[in-house]
C-alpha cells in the first residue's frame, strides 16, 4: 500500500545570541534592507519562525529554521504598492481571509534579476491565525502548521545567495 503521508515538520526551537548572528542569517542583498526590531534582548528564543516589520511596514522580515538546517535563514519581503482597487484575499500560507490592509502581495528577490511575489498576511502572523482558526473550529492546528512550515521551507529553497 503506497504511503501518501507527507513528512510534516514539527516545531523547531532555536536561539539568536547576538545582533551579528541575526544580521548574518540574512543574505547580503537583504542585509542592506534590514531595520532591526526595537528593544530586542539577546539571546532570544524562537519557535520555528520570527518575524517583524519596520515602522513603515514596507519591509517584512522573516527568520526561519527547519530541523534539517544548521542555521536559521532570513529573508526580506517588500510590500507591493497597490495602486488599484483595494482587494483582499486568502493568504497562500495560512488561508486566512482578510482585506487588503491585512493580506496582499509581498515580493522578494531570488537573485539580482529575479523576484517572486507571494500573496500573504502582511505581518506574517500566519501561525497565530492558524491557531486561532483551529481553536474556533475545535480542531488540532498541527496539520496546518506543518503545511505552513513546509511552504516557508520551499520559499527558502528557491532563494539564491
Ligand atoms: Zn497568513
Image: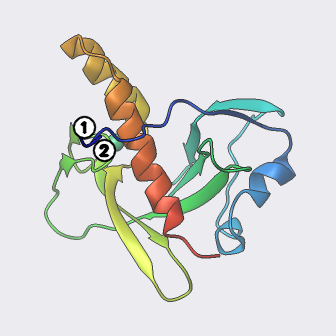
Mark-to-mark CA distance, 1 and 2: 10 Å
Q: Quadrant of the C terminus?
A: bottom right
For the rendered model, the colour scheme is rainbow
Q: Position of residue 30 (x, y in %)?
A: 64, 68
Within 8 Å of ligand 1, the CB of disc 1? yes
**Nearest the eye: 57 or 21:** 21
Residue that appears at 23% across and 39% down: 1
Q: Which residue is mark 2?
A: 102
Q: Which residue is mark 1?
A: 96
96 sits left or right of 127 in the view = left
Rendered-image quarter of ligand 1: top left
Q: Position of residue 131 (x, y in %)?
A: 36, 22
Residue that appears at 83% across and 48% down: 19
**Nearest the eye: 128 or 70:** 70
Is residue 64 shown to the viewer in this render? yes
Pointers 1 and 2 in contact (C-beta within 8 Å): yes
- So how many labels did they put on this image? 2
Residue that appears at 56% across and 53% down: 61
Q: Secondary structure at mark 2?
A: loop
Residue that appears at 51% across and 30% down: 10
Q: Secondary structure at mark 1?
A: loop
Residue 25 falls in image quadrant: bottom right
- Extreme bottom residue here? 113
Q: Position of residue 54 (x, y in %)?
A: 58, 51
Residue 133 badge: none
Amino acid at each position: 500500500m503506497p504511503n501518501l503521508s507527507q513528512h510534516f515538520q514539527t516545531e523547531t526551537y532555536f536561539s539568536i545570541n547576538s545582533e551579528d548572528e541575526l544580521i548574518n542569517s540574512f543574505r547580503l542583498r537583504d542585509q542592506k534592507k534590514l531595520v532591526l526590531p526595537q528593544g530586542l534582548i539577546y539571546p532570544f528564543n524562537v519557535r520555528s519562525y520570527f518575524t517583524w516589520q519596520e515602522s513603515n511596514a514596507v519591509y517584512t522580515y522573516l527568520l526561519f529554521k527547519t530541523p534539517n538546517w544548521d542555521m536559521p535563514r532570513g529573508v526580506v519581503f517588500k510590500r507591493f504598492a497597490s495602486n488599484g482597487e483595494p482587494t483582499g484575499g486568502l493568504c497562500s500560507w495560512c488561508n486566512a481571509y482578510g482585506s487588503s490592509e491585512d493580506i496582499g502581495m509581498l515580493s522578494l528577490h531570488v537573485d539580482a534579476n529575479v523576484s517572486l511575489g507571494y500573496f500573504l498576511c502582511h505581518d506574517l502572523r500566519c501561525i497565530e491565525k492558524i491557531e486561532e482558526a483551529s481553536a474556533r473550529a475545535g480542531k488540532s492546528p498541527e496539520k496546518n502548521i506543518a503545511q505552513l512550515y513546509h511552504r516557508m521551507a520551499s520559499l527558502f529553497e528557491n532563494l539564491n545567495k
